[in-house]
Amino acid sequence: MAARLVRLGSAVQNNTSLFKGLCKWQSTAAEAYKHKLINVPPTLVTVLKSGLRVASEDSGAATATVGIWIDAGSRYEDDRNNGVAHFLEHMAFKGTASRSQTDLELEIENMGAHLNAYTSREQTVYYAKCLSEDVSKAVDILADIIQNSKLGEAEIDRERGVILREMQEVESNLQEVVFDHLHSIAFQGTALGRTILGPSEVIKRITRNDLVDYVKTHYKSPRVVLAAAGGVNHSELVKAAEKHFVGLKTTYEGEIPILQPCRFTGSEIRVRDDSMPLAHIAIAVEACGWPDSDNIPLMVANTIIGAWDRSQGGGTNNASRLATAATESNLAHSFQSFNTCYTDTGLWGIYFVCDPLKCEDMLYNVQSEWMRLCTSVTESEVERARNLLKTSMLLQLDGTTPICEDIGRQMLCYNRRIPLHELESRIEKVTAKDVQEVAMKYIYDRCPAVAAVGPVENLPDYNRIRSSMYWLRL
């Protein structure tokens, strides 16, 4: 008996030593993590006399990404010219006053660089990936593209056909289709309700004058950010900006465009097609804009719900309760929680894909999890979500292009780039009470927007969905 007690005491002592060692290792790892965040290269910002902002992060890499972020997207369009911002993006590399399309392509190819562009609802972006010694050349090309594009009639007609084919391709991407429908009913009658590509009948009649008018109205220096990341010398980048962006005007000839607020409407749209094998459904509530202090707790709440795909491992050992339920009961093929932000509003919700007769059960579990966020989320869940969010934040900044995108977007959204250690600190301060409060504010007893495509007969009617947005407890 005495020997057994000695062995027990020894085991307890060994476990205590192991626990202390683990705590010490965790403390050291946390300190190293914080130290690395603080020692990330600073983001240098210079505002030119014209109002154009130049922002860069010099990591000393052999390559760099440099781009132009413009505060202009499909939200600044109307029913008459919906799709013009995206049309302009397509015309970007079709030649300028000093460079033909062939000259432009050869110059880029000889540099070994890559040009790209994309349009969102609030921003238009043109960027180049190149060697660090070619950053000034890339700035010259990008500045030439947005200031001196020829916008030739032949090229416009050719790109019109390309865009119409692109629309057909997008129609086959059901996730894109569902999110376009979701915006159309969540922000119906407002600019955010329109698609980025625009309706085909508008694309068919867009003229060169429409493109020129959009550039004259929206491509202004104070609404432009020149961002760069990688092997970038900030002072040389500023000199290149001062040299090449002299043609970008700061004043408006006509009425100054003002961003109109977009009203959220709880409603639904269903495109039922029983010939499709799977149902694609999105449900969302109105969230906050980029600068709102509620955004970080909403991101943590979004991370708690998580994302899952049937092809992933984990089974019933998933940390996300919704993923566990989806696995055990075979409720869905995949789901993805999202927090889409705009300047003054946003959409917080979930998109899932399920079998035809699983819509009701999956939605029931989704809404139950939402109500649990509002009433009984635990500190351990929030701690896990905080760690996941911080890890995801760092993984998304792996490479010069994601960092450059982060700089450009944050400069337009916040007029500064939030340092990583500050963002980490703000995430770390989020508690279960904070998550519960924002969930009660944005989710509880709110009218959702619902978009569903496919065999959705099994999806409950809107009134039932709305009645599950609150719990009555005795």
Image (tube, grey):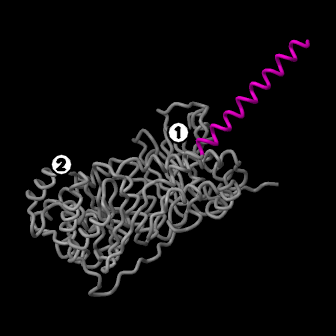
Q: As drawn, is 343 to the left or to the right of 197?
A: right
In the image, is residue 371 part of the stretch drawn in magenta? no
Q: Nearer the viewer, residue 141 or 89?
A: 141
Label 2: how many Cα within 10 Å (few below 14, some 14–19, many 20+): few
Look at discs 1 and 2 and give the one toward the viewer: 2
- Which residue does the image show at 39% across and 54% down from the upper left? 403
Q: Which residue is mark 2?
A: 112
- Which residue does the image show at 54% across and 66% down from the upper left? 288
Residue 58 makes an appearance in the image: yes
Asked if the residues shown at circle 1 and circle 2 are in contact, with their CB atoms under 8 angstroms apart, the answer is: no
In the image, is residue 9 part of the stretch drawn in magenta? yes
Between the residue at mark 1 and the residue at mark 2, the CA separation in whole angstroms equals: 44 Å
Residue 164: image location, x then y, percent: 23, 57
Q: Secondary structure at mark 1?
A: loop
Position of residue 387 relative to residue 196, above or below, is above
User: In the rendered image, which quarter contains the C terminus?
Assistant: bottom right
| Amino acid, disc 1 | Ala
Q: As drawn, is 363 to the left or to the right of 74?
A: right
Label 1: how many Cα within 10 Å (few below 14, some 14–19, many 20+): many
Q: Nearer the viewer, residue 90 or 360?
A: 90
Task: Find the magenta span and give its range.
Answer: 1-30
Q: As drawn, is 281 to the left or to the right of 133?
A: right
- Magenta part mainly helix, strand or loop? helix
User: In the rendered image, which quarter contains the N terminus?
Assistant: top right
Q: Secondary structure at mark 2?
A: loop
Furthest toward the bottom, the residue is 254
Tell which circle, 1 or 2, labels the residue nearer the N-terminal end: 2
Q: Which residue is mark 1?
A: 332
| Amino acid, disc 2 | Gly
